Image: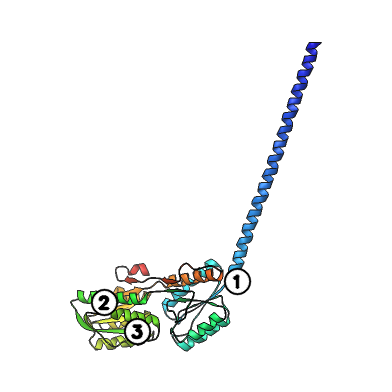
């Protein structure tokens, strides 16, 4: 009887133990399932929040408007500024437009600026034809709450940022290159002719003055500057006039000026001087490769456009610019490295 009772007690204990184990397992499974479901819900909520934030950012970007106004639409330089700006705008998803006068003319640029201001962009990016003549027009943009950024050529009015070449330094380097090549030819004195595109645009003034400064203390003589008004034919005529006066060196301080100077040298094969220029367009590079131009100073126009649009985006979204006066650089381009700029 005792044995039977003991066996019954042991069986009951085992059953109770198994029941307890089974209950614990079901509870753990339920808790794990509940935790997993909670985690999945949290992840889905986070993903939804990220998607909503991304959509908000895209919507915010699409509401931003930036207009670029250059000196004209003829020079390859401005085409490349636009290319950099347009690519950055597409990447950021903002509205962007390039507006330009038919030629470098103060009144024409003012008309274009007025049209741009009437469109009420968030940011206006400008290359000033004249640093003083467009100031009142630009001030009206600021008064309307439009932010202002300069590329290539600033006006004499404070802006949020400026993306330019140090034109004085680049012009000075062009002068040094000319002197070095003249001396390599054994020419240590003589007249130098400069074909500039403007006596009002600060870019041209700085490039000319920088170039002239390189000749300080030498036996070379700088003749009165001639102006090609950013026209290849007029620049070539000015350069040929200089050649007829017996100059030993020539300098064209922008793309049409450099091409005009190079064309004049190519048309006067007996001339044994040295010619240098500004802006590495395909035509100018062809003249470098042919030897008509010894070198050109290459700017970074795409970098100007890209930097300006990214800065515009930062300003329009309430951000702060880390750098507001950006030197986009210049490089000496000769036959040795011209392929790198094509």
Q: Is residue 9 left or right of residue 285?
A: right
N-terminal-most mark, 2 or 3 = 2
Instruction: Describe the element under mark 2 as helix, strand or loop.
Output: helix
**Image quadrant containing the C terminus:** bottom left
Residue at the location (44% across, 77% down)? 78
Q: Residue 184: image x %, image y %? A: 20, 74
Q: Which residue is mark 1?
A: 63
* Residue 117 seen from this side: yes
Instruction: Describe the element under mark 1 as helix, strand or loop.
Output: loop
Q: Is residue 237 above or below residue 68?
A: below
Q: Which residue is mark 3?
A: 196
Q: Residue 75: image x %, image y %? A: 42, 79
Q: Is residue 214 left or right of residue 280?
A: left
Q: Residue 168: image x %, image y %? A: 34, 77
Q: Residue 210: image x %, image y %? A: 32, 78
Using the image, tell me which numbered label, if any, was put on residue 178: 2
**Image quadrant containing the N terminus:** top right
Residue nearest the observer in this picture, 193 or 256: 193
Q: Is residue 51 above or below residue 335?
A: above
Instruction: Describe the element under mark 3 as helix, strand or loop.
Output: strand
N-terminal-most mark, 1 or 2 = 1
Q: Quadrant of residue 72?
A: bottom left
């Amino acid at each position: 009887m005792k044995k039977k009772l003991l066996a019954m007690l042991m069986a009951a204990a085992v059953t109770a133990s198994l029941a307890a184990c089974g209950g614990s397992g079901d509870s753990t499974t339920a808790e794990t399932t509940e935790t997993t479901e909670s985690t999945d819900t949290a992840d889905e909520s986070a993903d939804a929040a990220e998607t909503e934030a991304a959509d908000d950012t895209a919507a915010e970007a699409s509401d931003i408007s930036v207009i670029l106004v250059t000196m004209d639409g003829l020079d390859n330089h401005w085409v490349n500024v636009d290319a950099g700006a347009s690519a950055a705008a597409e990447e950021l998803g903002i509205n962007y437009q390039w507006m330009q006068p038919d030629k470098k003319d103060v009144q024409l640029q003012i008309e274009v600026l007025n049209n741009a201001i009437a469109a009420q962009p968030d940011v206006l990016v400008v290359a000033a034809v004249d640093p003083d003549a467009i100031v009142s027009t630009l001030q009206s943009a600021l008064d309307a709450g439009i932010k202002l950024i300069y590329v290539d050529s600033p006006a004499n009015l404070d802006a949020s940022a400026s993306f330019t070449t140090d034109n004085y330094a680049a012009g000075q380097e062009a002068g040094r290159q000319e002197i070095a090549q003249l001396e390599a030819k054994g020419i240590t004195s003589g007249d130098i002719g400069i074909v500039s595109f403007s006596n009002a645009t600060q870019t041209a003034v700085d490039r000319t003055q920088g170039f002239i400064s390189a000749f300080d203390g030498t036996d070379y003589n700088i003749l009165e500057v001639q102006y090609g008004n950013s026209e290849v034919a007029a620049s070539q005529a000015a350069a040929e006039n200089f050649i007829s006066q017996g100059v030993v060196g020539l300098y064209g301080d922008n793309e049409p000026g450099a091409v005009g100077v190079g064309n004049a040298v190519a048309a006067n094969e007996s001339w044994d001087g040295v010619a240098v220029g500004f802006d590495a367009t395909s035509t100018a590079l062809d003249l470098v490769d042919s030897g008509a131009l010894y070198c050109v100073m290459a700017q970074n126009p795409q970098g100007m456009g890209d930097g300006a649009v990214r800065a515009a985006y930062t300003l329009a979204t309430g951000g702060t610019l880390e750098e507001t006066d950006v030197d986009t650089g210049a490089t000496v381009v000769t036959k040795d490295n011209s392929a790198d700029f094509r």
